[in-house]
Image (tube, grey):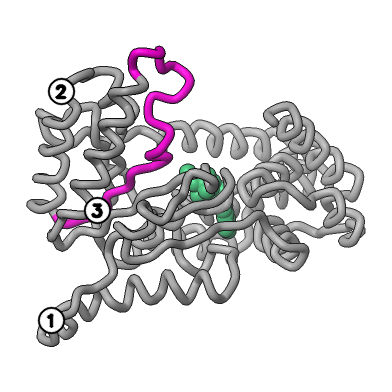
Amino acid sequence: MATAQHIKALIQSHFSNEPERFTTLALQVAAHEAKKGHINLADDIRKLVDRGKIRQKVLKPVNQDLEGLILEISPVHKLANLIATDQLKTRISRILNEFRQRNKLKTHDLENRRKILLSGPPGTGKTMTASIIARELRLPLYVVLLDRMVTKFMGETSAKLRLVFDMISNRPGVYLFDEFDAIGGERAKDNDVGEMRRVLTALLQFIEADKSDSIIVAATNNVTLLDQALFRRFDDVLQYQIPTDAEIVELMKNRLAGFEVKFDLSRVVSLARGLSHAELTSACLDAMKETILDGGKAIETTLLEQMLQNRLEVYNNKR
Ligand SMILES: Nc1ncnc2c1ncn2[C@@H]1O[C@H](COP(=O)(O)OP(=O)(O)O)[C@@H](O)[C@H]1O
Ligand SMILES: [Mg+2]
């Protein structure tokens, strides 16, 4: 049986809507069982976790005219779980604080910062930040699928954008334009390029004109694209970086909490250098699963190194 501590923690994470923590705890229970030789039970738990993860990604459509173009997703991340510099966390706190006290600001003719640009390499916490802001402010989180808008409504995208911004005015929330500068992406045909540029320009104009109570978050992986004209339209620009050595250690400790860890930290850190937070997270989860399936007690250096190596290979192939 799982320990009393595990059961309490599982219940708590369920009611405080922390699915990531719930997943970690469930895997810890599986590890605990595996250690005691209950391999089948451990494996069953792991399968349940895998199935649950798939279900969690099912998204709700919003209103009819925007069906398939805006999705509401449940914001699950907490600020406390973001691994970033104090400076970055302070700036996120300032967004939250100004929103909470926006009426006070209004009496002095000031506005809370609510048009935010996030930039940095993939897997460093930009989407997570939108989720954090929504969760901390108890606002719904809407993801605008610009890419789909452009490919599906060629020529009518400005009209659709207008509908999106009507919704932003009428329904307060956090609106995420994720990877907004990559619209069209690789699927784009040459004759779509002009349309995409028009959409991007229109989007920036809509953002600039917006006077709603919603928070608009635009995220980009493409740091070089940022120019002064773009910065000007946002109230704040947050830069994300791949983790420092200290942040790598912090992330591993958080992720592997509950497992006995037998690894050479400095070796692991030197291997992990250059990987994003998301890739490190995946390597830790892979190592946890493997340990559980092998009925092992502790996460061994070689295993963690192997998982990091796998991630590095994927990463290097992508570049
Ligand atoms: N700075 C971070 N701190 C802690 N976990 C992170 C961080 N960045 C990414 N992660 C983990 O990786 C996952 C994917 O990151 P995401 O926010 O989608 O990256 P991005 O949007 O920058 O590409 C997150 O859900 C989280 O589990
Ligand atoms: Mg993202």
- Give residue 64's position: percent from left, percent from top: 10, 29
Q: Earlier in the sequence, mark 3 or mark 2?
A: 3
Observer-nearest of 72 and 294: 72
Does residue 284 sit above or below 138 in this rendering? above
Kindly indicate the quadrant of the structure image that contains residue 131.
Answer: bottom left
Q: Secondary structure at mark 1?
A: loop
- The residue to which callout 1 is attached is 109
Q: Amino acid at mark 3?
A: Pro
- Give residue 166's position: percent from left, percent from top: 9, 45
- Give residue 1's position: percent from left, percent from top: 64, 52
Query: At x 79% / y 39%, what residue is drawn?
Result: 307
Q: Which mark is residue 140?
A: 3
Taking the image as drawn, is residue 7 in sight? yes
Locate residue 238 relative to residue 198 in the image: left or right.
right
Q: Secondary structure at mark 2?
A: loop
**Mark 2 and mark 1: Cα distance apart in space:** 37 Å
- The residue to which callout 2 is attached is 156
Observer-nearest of 134 and 49: 134
Observer-nearest of 29 and 218: 218
**Mark 3 and mark 1: Cα distance apart in space:** 26 Å
**Mark 3 and mark 2: Cα distance apart in space:** 27 Å
Taking the image as drawn, is residue 18 in sight? no
Q: Earlier in the sequence, mark 2 or mark 1?
A: 1
- Give residue 86's position: percent from left, percent from top: 57, 75
Q: Earlier in the sequence, mark 3 or mark 1?
A: 1
Locate residue 247 relative to residue 168 in the image: left or right.
right
Residue 175 in magenta stretch: yes
Q: Which residues are magenta?
A: 172-192
- Depth check, mark 3 against mark 2: the one in front is 2
Query: At x 40% / y 74%, what residue is drawn?
Result: 93
> Counting other residues with Cα less than 10 Å from the Cα at mark 3, is it few (<14), some (14-19), or many (20 or more)?
many
Q: Secondary structure at mark 3?
A: loop
